[in-house]
């Protein structure tokens, strides 16, 4: 019975993957709101630049960590 429970578990999600999904969601929601606000006549150029720079940079850094494995290897001796 214990083996059946292990087979039906969901694969473990890493926190890095969740953060990338969160960042993309924020960018998508902000884009929709900014598009709607532009039709109303409101423009936030500086805010748009800051949002895309910060969350775009975070997505880039997460991608670099995944690609180049910049995480420190754990020492089994310690």
Image: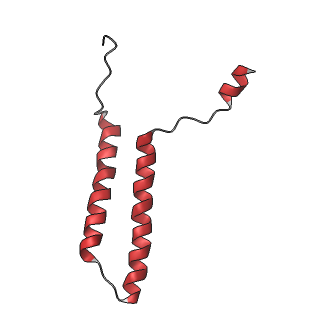
Q: Is residue 68 above or below residue 30?
A: above
Q: Residue furthest left?
A: 46
Q: Is residue 76 above or below residue 39?
A: above
The residue sitting at 37% across, 84% down in the picture is 38
Residue 12 vertical placement versus 32 (above, below): above
Q: Quadrant of residue 44?
A: bottom left
**Res 10 quadrant in image:** top right
Residue 23 placement, left or right of 58: right
Farthest right residue in view: 1
Q: Residue at x 31, y 39 (%)?
A: 65
**Tally of marks:** 0
Q: Which residue shows up at 39% across the image and 63% down it? A: 27
Q: Position of residue 70 (x, y in %)?
A: 28, 33
**Where 72 falls versus 63 (above or below)?**
above
> At 30% from the left edge and 63% from the top edge, which residue is drawn?
52
Left or right for 7, reference 36: right
Q: How is the image coloured?
A: secondary structure
19 lies left or right of 73: right
- Residue 21 coordinates in the image, percent (x, y): 45, 52
- Residue projecting furthest to the top: 77
Position of residue 67 measured from the top left corner of the image (x, y, whole percent): 33, 38
- The quadrant of the image that shows the C terminus is top left
Q: Residue furthest front?
A: 78
| Quarter containing the N terminus | top right
**Could you say where residue 74 lies in the image, as x and y percent from the top left?**
32, 21
């Amino acid at each position: 019975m214990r083996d059946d429970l292990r087979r039906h578990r969901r694969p473990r999600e890493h926190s890095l993957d969740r953060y990338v999904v969160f960042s993309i969601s924020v960018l998508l929601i902000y884009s929709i709101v900014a598009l709607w606000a532009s039709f109303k006549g409101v423009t936030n150029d500086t805010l748009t630049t800051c949002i895309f720079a910060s969350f775009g940079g975070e997505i880039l850094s997460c991608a670099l960590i995944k690609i180049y494995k910049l995480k420190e290897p754990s020492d089994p001796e310690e």
